[in-house]
Amino acid sequence: MAKWYHEEFKGKGRITFKNSGNYYEARTDSAADKVARQRQFDFSVGWFGGPWTDGDYPKSLKDTLGDILPKLTEAEKAMIKGSCDFYALDGYTSYTASGSRNFEACVSNSSYPGFPECSSSSLIAADGFPMGPAADPAMNWLASTPTGIRKFLSFLTKEYFPKITDIVVSEFGFAEPFEGKLTNMASILWDVRRAVSGMAG
């Protein structure tokens, strides 16, 4: 992508594609939950980021999806790897990841509930409290977890994609409860929760 942009179109800017994903923590220290955490990352940011950073899909995708997943030729891997000028991330919220009770049955059967991740996620932490304050009821998947984005960036650059040298948070935030119904500009501008969350993050 970047090669064509710079060489064919003589582009002077920087180009990439955005990766959408969320941060996951293993719900417990069990091996099953740690595998679940890894699979949640593999089946989100790893799906597209893996070929770009490492030249191929994560092993868990290839093992689980088999022939469903396109097989990249060596030429395609070489073309895709490093083909962006930087890594862009839309990382909104955080979850805990839990292993599937019937993991082997799940990964071997594409009609099994939970396939292909074969793990579950929750906005509730192991201690029973939410991962962060709830957002608007219309967006019940989105909790305010500013510390999660810091952990996510650390995980991506130090563990998951250590070859990344340049990363941009291209989207991040959360919805205030019922803010879509606000009509008074002063109330709209009184954005204390986001300001406090930003400082905490």
Image (cartoon, rainbow, N blue to C red):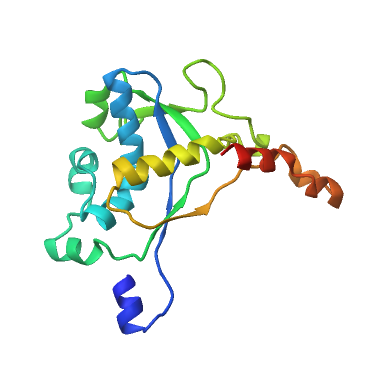
Residue in view at x 23 percent, y 42 percent: 65
Count every numbered label the image shows and give the total.
0
Residue in view at x 52 percent, y 38 percent: 93
For residue 179, what is the image quadrant? top right
Among all residues in the image, which is located at the extreme top?
127
Q: Is residue 113 visible?
A: no
Q: Is residue 92 visible?
A: yes
For residue 76, what is the image quadrant? bottom left
Looking at the rendering, in which quadrant would you find the C terminus? Answer: top right
Nearer to us in this view, 28 or 32: 28
Q: Position of residue 100 (x, y in %)?
A: 32, 22
Looking at the rendering, in which quadrant would you find the N terminus? Answer: bottom left
Nearer to us in this view, 107 or 48: 48
Among all residues in the image, which is located at the extreme front?
199
Nearer to us in this view, 147 or 20: 147
Q: Position of residue 51 (x, y in %)?
A: 25, 55
Residue in view at x 40 percent, y 21 percent: 27
Asked whether, in this view, residue 161 is left or right of residue 191, the answer is left
- Does 165 appear above or below 78? above
Q: Position of residue 156 (x, y in %)?
A: 36, 44
- Does 183 appear above or below 75? above
- Does 42 appear above or below 122? below
Asked whether, in this view, residue 73 is left or right of residue 105, the answer is left
Residue in view at x 36 percent, y 30 percent: 114
Asked whether, in this view, residue 122 is left or right of residue 190, the answer is left
Q: Position of residue 87 (x, y in %)?
A: 38, 57
Asked whether, in this view, residue 173 is left or right of residue 59, the answer is right
